[in-house]
Each structure stands twice: as C-alpha cells, then as structure tokens.
Amino acid sequence: MNRRTAIKLGILSSGIVAMPTSLMGNTIPTTNNKQSNCGYIKMDWGKTELYIFTDGHMVLENPQPTFAPQIDATTFRSELEKLHLGNKAIDMAINIMAIKTKDKAILIDSGLGNHFGASQGWLLENLQSAGISANSVTDILITHAHRDHIGGLVSKNNTIVYPNARYYMAKAEYDFWMSDNPDFSKSKLTDEQKKGTIAFTKKILNITKDKLNLFNPGDALFSIVNTELAEGHTPGHTIYSISSEGKSIKNIVDVFHSPLLITNPEWGIEFDIDFEQGIQTRTKVLEDCYTNKRLIMSSHLPWPGLGYIDKREKYFWAPLYYSTPNEIKI
C-alpha cells in the first residue's frame, strides 16, 4: 500500500473541528413527508443531509459470557428484565450513518454485507431507496475493522462494492490488524474467535488496501467531521463527530452495544480487544455525552440508535423522540 499517511490537499487537515457542546435549542422533531420505506431516517441540516440506515441486526441467543463475563447469571438476567430487554437473547441493531453534501456521499462503515445470512446486508437496498447508489458513494469512513463494520465493503464474490469511493481508517487500526500477530492478550475471546476474526478482517483489508487512506485520530475530515480515538474495543476504534450549521452529532460506534452497558459500563463485553481499556473508555464517553448533552448515534443500540445519555443514580439511554418516519427535523 502506498498511501500510509494522512491525505492532505483539503481533504484531511490536522486541525480539530470545533464541536458545539449541545444541540441548538430543544425543538421537537417533526416531519412533512409520509414515506413508505422505513429502512432509513433522514435529518435535514440545510446544506448537509444526515442519514441513518439499517443493515439488519444480530441476535445473541446466549448473551453471556459475551456480555458481562464476570457477572453472575442471576444478576445479569435480572438487569435485562429491569431494562425491559427480555431475559434471554440480546438483539443488536446494525445502524449505519451517511452524510450527503453538495459534492459528497459519505458512509461511516458498511455493515456486515451478505457474508453471514439474511438478517444482515440490507444497507445497499436501503441506500437505493434513499437515492444513493453504490457507484455514487464518494468516501467511506471506517470506525474500526470488525466484520460488522467492514464486511459490506466486499461482496461474497470478493468484489469491491463501492468502486468509486476512497476509504479512510485510523493508522493504528490498520497497523494492528495487518501485523503478523495481532495482540489479543488483553481480550477475553477464545482462540477460535480470535482466529476467525483476524482471518476475516485481513481478507477484507487486503482486498481494499489500494483504496485505503490512513489518518491519525484528531485529524479533521471534509471540514465537518472530527475524529477521536476511543480505544479498547479495538486499538484504533474511532468516534466520528459531525458538525454543520450549528448542529452536531457524535457517532460513538461500539463504545456500548446495548442499553445494558450504558447502565452497567463496568460489566464489559468480550468483543473488546482490551477488556479493561474498553471499560475505561466507555465510562469516559458516557460522562462526556451526559455532561455535554450530546446527541449521539450508536451502531448497535435499538434502531435507529439516536438519542442521549441521561443519568439518575446510573446512566441510562434516552432515545431521540420523533413521531413519524422517515424525516426528522432537529
């Protein structure tokens, strides 16, 4: 690969985008259009259009020990019921953010694609419903290299799905996965899980490496996107914050996969490559989002993954209120 450093020339800059600490006002979302398709939600920010698409969902029939591996089963099930999450399976959404400007169609991640079954890989169809073709996508910002975030870059036949796009990833993330022996010593995954994860990620990154541009967290992309390291889940796990026309939203990606980990951030999840660092990052991000009243988007919280972090005795998830699909005014 010959583009191992941050791309400049107006696309990336080393400056950090100034982010508002809260939304401008507390306007109740409204809609003027009745649309039949519910596979995406659109937020109109004037010259910038923000979309959330569904790529499907993933069901963990036996969520322990993936979630809360060190918590006793009775306490775990009790907390699921208390949070109205059932008492057995955990169903995780796959929410994908996209940004449209005058000359850009930018995806943040690509979902799982069609590699693992019919309950995922819905992104392409939903993009088309919103008038965005695979060929028209100009840029793809990769948050991290887990399969449910990069699988959709490549088809089941190993062809590139978005042929005209440039891809962006944190250098630390790329270097970790493409090293000879990625270090999972601080994770709680089994050897079999590690082996499968590494093999799939290396395959996708090898197919797409000639289109990949690397940056360092803190770099600004396209003048409206700020990048922030949120390590623990992976070494280069990157939060993207979008700021335009006095409004902002923070894509916290996989900092937490369920409302369960918002209320109990210290319980942890085996998906984190550095389990203890994941807990520290989760707690830090929760406090920042709560203190600064940030509107956030999560990759795996219940569709569409939009809302706020609130707090009484503990943190809890407060979904964004809106009345009708598909267009939200904020």
Image (cartoon, rainbow, N blue to C red):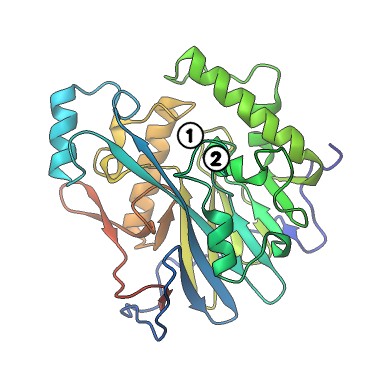
Q: Amino acid at mark 1?
A: His
Q: Is residue 215 above or below residue 191?
A: below
Give the numbered dot on residue 233: 1
Which quadrant of the figure contains the C terminus?
A: bottom left
Residue shown at 18% from the left, 23% from the top? 73
Pinpoint residue 235: horizontal percent, then vertical percent.
Answer: 56, 32
Residue shown at 21% from the left, 44% from the top? 85
Confirm whether residue 219 shows in the render.
no
Which quadrant of the figure contains the N terminus?
A: top right
Pinpoint residue 199: horizontal percent, then vertical percent.
Answer: 63, 23
Residue at far bottom of view: 32
Instruction: Give the residue pinned by disc 2.
Output: 237
Q: Is residue 204 above or below residue 295?
A: above
Confirm whether residue 161 shows in the render.
yes
Give the numbered dot on residue 299: none
Rendering quarter of residue 102 = bottom right
Pinpoint residue 38: horizontal percent, then vertical percent.
Answer: 41, 66
Rendering quarter of residue 190 = top left
Residue shown at 50% from the left, 15% from the top? 192
Residue at far right of view: 2
Residue shown at 53% from the left, 47% from the top? 121
Q: Amino acid at mark 2?
A: His
Cα gap from disc 2 to disc 1, whole angstroms: 6 Å
Position of 78 compared to 193: left or right? Answer: left
Mark 1: few/some/many CA within 10 Å (<14, 14-19, 20+): many
Residue at far top of view: 191
